[in-house]
Image (spheres, rainbow, N blue to C red):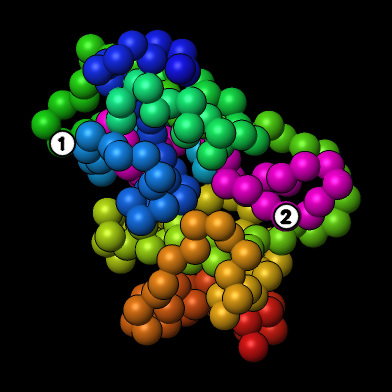
Amino acid sequence: MGEGATSGALVGYFGYGSLVNRDTHRTEIVDALPARLKGWRRHWVRRDEASNRALLSVRREAGAVIDGLLVLDRAENLAAVDIREERYKRVLIAPDDLELTGGVPSDFPLYVYEASVCEGKGRLEIIQSYLDAVLQGFLREHGRAGVERFIHETDGFDAAILADRKRPTYPRAVTLEAEEQAFFDALLMQITPDFASFVR
């Protein structure tokens, strides 16, 4: 069992990337609530020193706030979530770090997953099927304005987009509706000048 994994106990973890999309969850969660995390900024980082592939991560930054999803899960499932997030370290956060309609639970531990920053050369590469899962989650939980905030409040979107939508390489890939695809691509076109050349 994971840290604090007493049978029947609960834990919370704040998702800010693919965890925002409930279709990517692989444990039987108890609940999930749209939320905002204060004092952290989202950014793309290199997955490892041998690769240009990008992962979403967060870093502490005073005054920053990011949208996401507070997932309430059984503590015995935490080990499985840790395996899913194997490139991340699980960091304790305080209830006061979260903004949540109806109040933040304070009777069990709350976490966020933070990836290690790897040094390397070459332009970062974002897998499109991964990004699709993330953006679909934000659309469902935070609406179109939430997707736009995600794009504009995430550092590192000067990365290349690897077009694998037709043959997804992301293990928890999702299916987009035509209007979702058009909306996401139009937003990316605005901030990534060569986006069109990657998705032909």
Q: Amino acid at mark 1?
A: Thr
Residue at 68% of width from left, 79% of height from top?
Answer: 198
Residue nearest the viewer, comparing 95 with 128 = 128
- Residue 144 locus on image (x, y percent): 30, 66
Element type where label 2 sits in the image: loop
Residue at 32% of width from left, 62% of height from top?
Answer: 139
Residue annotated with mark 1: 101
Q: Along the horizontal axis of the image, is 139 left or right of 152?
A: left
Residue nearest the viewer, comparing 7 with 183 = 7
Residue annotated with mark 2: 53
- Residue 57 locus on image (x, y percent): 57, 40
Establish if 45 lies above or below 99. Answer: below
How much space separates mark 1 and mark 2, taking CA atoms?
35 Å
Q: Is residue 50 magenta?
A: yes
User: How many numbered discs, if any?
Assistant: 2
Q: What range of the chain is rendered magenta?
A: 43-72
Residue 62: assigned label: none
Residue nearest the viewer, comparing 127 with 148 = 127
Who comes first in sequence, dot 1 or dot 2?
A: 2
Establish if 199 lies above or below 111. Answer: below
The answer to whether residue 195 is visible is no
Residue at 56% of width from left, 33% of height from top?
Answer: 83
Position of the C terminus, as image quadrant, is bottom right
